[in-house]
Image (tube, helix red, strand yellow):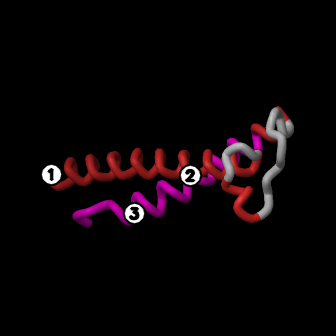
């Protein structure tokens, strides 16, 4: 495997978005809806960061991108070490 892009993309985004959803569930358990005026679970409101659901969806995206970048760098460096041996 020369380029770890697809492995990192699938593994990192799925893991990261899963962790983002756990973050959202934890937030909801401890804070309830907090200071969010609207739940925002319908249509485009589900992606509005000013609603509770939108905030959770965006945190899932951020976690997914962060895990993708982390995994891409880690797998790339691992491949460099393995290719030297």
Secondary structure category for the residue under label 2: helix
Is 29 on the left-hand or right-hand side of 49?
right
- The segment highlighted magenta reads 1-26
Alpha carbons under labels 3 and 2: distance apart: 18 Å
Is 77 on the left-hand or right-hand side of 13?
left
Q: Which mark is residue 7?
A: 3
Residue sitting at 15 percent across and 51 percent down?
85
What is the x, y in percent for residue 38? Answer: 83, 46
What secondary structure predominates along the stretch shown in magenta? helix
Name the residue beneath numbered marker 2.
Answer: 61
**Is residue 2 located in the magenta-colored stretch of the structure?**
yes
Name the residue beneath numbered marker 1.
Answer: 85
Q: Residues within 10 Å of mark 3 (few under 14, many from 20)?
A: some
Alpha carbons under labels 3 and 1: distance apart: 22 Å
What is the x, y in percent for residue 23? Answer: 68, 42
Marks 3 and 1 in Cβ contact (< 8 Å)? no
């Amino acid at each position: 495997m020369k380029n770890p892009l697809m492995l990192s993309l699938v593994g990192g985004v799925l893991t990261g978005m899963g962790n983002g959803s756990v973050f959202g569930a934890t937030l909801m358990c401890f804070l309830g809806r907090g200071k969010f005026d609207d739940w925002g679970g319908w249509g485009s409101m589900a992606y509005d960061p000013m609603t509770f659901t939108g905030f959770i969806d965006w945190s899932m995206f951020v976690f997914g991108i962060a895990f993708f970048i982390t995994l891409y760098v880690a797998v790339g460096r691992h491949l460099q070490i393995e290719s030297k041996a």
